[in-house]
Amino acid sequence: MRIDRYLEYAKDVKNALLDGKPVVALESTILSHNLPYPENIEIVKKVGGIIESQGAVPATIAIIKGRIKIGLTKEELEFLGESREIKKASRRDIPMILAREEHGATTVAATMVLADLAKIKVFVTGAIGGVHCGAETTFDVSADLEELSRTNVAVVCAGVKPTQDIGRTLEVLESKGVPVIGYGTSEFPAFYTAKSGYGVNTFVEDEKELALAIKFKWALGLKGGVVAANPIPIEDALDQDLIDRSVEEGFMEGKKENIQGKAWTAYLHNRIKSNVGDAWIKSNGALLYNNAKVGAALAKELNDILYR
């Protein structure tokens, strides 16, 4: 089977790849599952505009009617943003969604798989998945971490959400040999805030050094991605104490309500959202815009280093 028969490229993305121009992958769960309509559409369009203004081409990845979309039309973007028929697609879900000709919004893991298939080496997202609360008994660990250990795509993100077990997440990444590099920071960010209390492996001040490190990693045959941890701008961060208190109180209340396994993440995130109001949407947008700038700059530099 030739899987490339199932890939459909947006015209600008196809031309960029053929011409050797930098392309930045974007996930589609942000459209279908993470942000409310119509803010989801507005934010993704602005992210794309920022990437374009930096000299790269954005490619939102999704599955529509059993076809792998590498870049979306305006109509497809609206469809994913409005429809309630979109499945959340991780690595394990891709084959069945294709077989049944269904619609799928790609997670970090699935976006990495499909970006690699399309030969796109840089991916911008909000946060990677991590080790979930209570994973010591539930073994609930995001597929994103395994994908980072095997797929050669650099992921620019604002760390992991504070609803995850950040310490254990970093331990898993370390054990799998995934470099966690702070972009202008020595502290691993926690999505809504620039600080988590945990360090990174190392940090870089610019995209040139980051791109060079990525080149050496892959040239050495060290398979897997790189986490470029880019903190939310301070002026757009949510109140650290409020976030910490929301999570702590959420844990106490959740135990009383007998919250179990996978339900913890959504429960704690809803607790944060109820405490901060609509500010969480603004912060989501701000960190994505910031990641888009870094991702586009990295894609340009990495493109030059890998293919010149």
Image: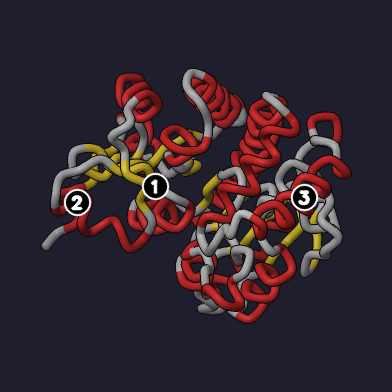
Towards the viewer: 16 or 106? 106
Which image quadrant is residue 243 in?
top right
Q: Residues within 10 Å of mark 1 (few under 14, many from 20)?
A: many
Q: Residues within 10 Å of mark 2 (few under 14, many from 20)?
A: some
* Distance from the alpha carbon under mark 1 to that under mark 3: 31 Å
Q: Residues within 10 Å of mark 3 (few under 14, many from 20)?
A: some
Q: Amino acid at mark 3?
A: Glu
The disc, 2 or 1, on the residue closer to the chain's N-terminal end is 2
Q: Which residue is mark 2?
A: 98
> How does the figure colour the protein chain or chains?
secondary structure
With respect to residue 306, does 192 lie above or below? above
Counting from the top left corner in percent of width and height, residue 98 is at: 19, 51
Which image quadrant is residue 50 in?
top right
Residue sitting at x 51%, y 37% = 34
Assign a secondary structure to mark 1. strand
Left or right: 36 as drawn, with respect to 15: right
Counting from the top left corner in percent of width and height, residue 38 is at: 48, 18
Give the number of the disc on residue 106.
1
Determine the residue located farthest toward the left in the rendered image. 1
The disc, 2 or 3, on the residue closer to the chain's N-terminal end is 2
* Distance from the alpha carbon under mark 2 to that under mark 1: 12 Å
